[in-house]
Amino acid sequence: MRGFSNEFADFPDYILKITEQIWENRGLGARMRDYYHQDVIVRMPGGISTGEPASTYATMGTLTEFPDRVLLGEDVIWSGDPEAGMLSSHRIMTTATHRGGHFGPATGKPVTYRAIADCYAKDNQISDEWLIRDNGAIVRQLGLSPQDWVARERSEGRSVGVFTPADDFDGPYLGRGNDNPWGAKYEGILKRIMSAEFSAIPEEYDRACHLEYPGGVTAHGHKAADAFWLGLRAALPSAKFETHHVIGREDSMMPPRAAVRWSLTGTHDGWGALGRPTGKSVHVMGISHAEFGPWGLRREWVLYDELALWAQVMAE
């Protein structure tokens, strides 16, 4: 790959190896400076940060809370080329033990949760990133609901950060993915669902579909997919749905797959996954991955941060 170190065989290899080097091998000094641009922008549902030092400090804080964290790369769905830069949508399964920090006093409890990071890299460095962790899964495994966690933080005088479109600004990556038909297919399915065409689920999903949803939820079949997407859309029925980045890929030894970064922005004005309508303004930052088989969409992974959603719904 032109502009990248010869130690990496290809772009997925780059993403997987630098993740291990930074997190598990503790490459928080020179490695972070090697692989993260000094002005890197990182957007998360809980806020936006700029600069490599901020990313390094956040990484140290997470490792203090989860010192035995292991990051298992499940997939890297990517687009672009070395000359223009490449965008990876990297799905990670984490195992760790909670030793105390952002999520509260040490519990010693084991946690397992997913994250998806969309990273733009060029010349061996990441300069733009969109990152979603399944924080709802973490707090549930620590014995709290997302609502309880938000309420506890506020009762103890701590603010719960939220990222909204008003906070955003353009970074170095302005691409929207690629034109692979599998990405377009999944984007089309999501657009149908968000237009209240829930018939898209029995029409497009495999009857035996495997589903991974926020909060560490694993489910199967059409009814589970319908319950998840209907619950989210019903809570925000007038919100604007947008797709911001779409990748499709067909790779050797892999099923056709897609990655879509999307958002819902509007008012909590319906009964659904967020309970009684509050009329509060809500922005949902979401990333979804899908795999396709002979009978339709066979696996789906969806992430958004439930803590950020409840912080907006519970805002005073």
Image (tube, rainbow, N blue to C red):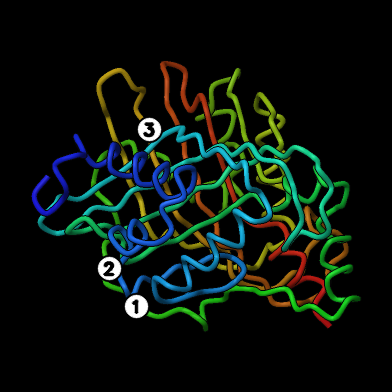
Q: Residues within 10 Å of mark 2 (few under 14, many from 20)?
A: few
* Disc 1 residue crowd, few under 14, some 14–19, many 20+, Cα 10 Å: few
Quarter placement of the C terminus: bottom right
Q: Which badge, 3 or 2, comes first in the chain's sequence?
A: 2
Identify which residue, 48 or 80, lies in the foreground. Answer: 48
Indicate the secondary structure of the residue bearing disc 3: strand
Q: Quadrant of residue 90?
A: top left
Name the residue: 74% across, 69% down.
268
- CA gap between label 3 and label 2 equals 22 Å
User: What residue sits right under mark 1 in the picture?
Assistant: 170
Type of amino acid under label 1: Asp
Choose mark 1 or mark 3, whichever is in front: 1
Mark 1 lies on a secondary structure that is: loop
Q: Are marks 2 and 1 in contact (CB under 8 Å)?
A: yes
Quickly name the residue at label 3. 257
Give the amino acid type for the residue marked by disc 3 in the picture: Arg
- Say above or below: 269 vs 106: below
Residue at image position (36%, 70%) is 40
The CA span between labels 1 and 3 is 27 Å
> Mark 2 is on which residue type?
Leu
Q: Residue visible at 49% across and 51% down?
A: 191
**Horizontal relation, residue 77 to residue 4: left or right:** right
- SS under mark 2: loop
Look at the numbered discs 3 and 2 and tell me whether their residues touch, using CB distance below 8 Å: no
User: Is 88 rendered above or below residue 75?
Assistant: below
- List x then y, in percent, for residue 168: 46, 78
- What residue sits right under mark 2 in the picture? 174
N-term-proximal mark, 1 vs 3: 1
- Which quadrant would residue 53 be assigned to in this image? bottom left
- The N terminus - image quarter: top left
Left or right of 72 on screen, residue 83: left
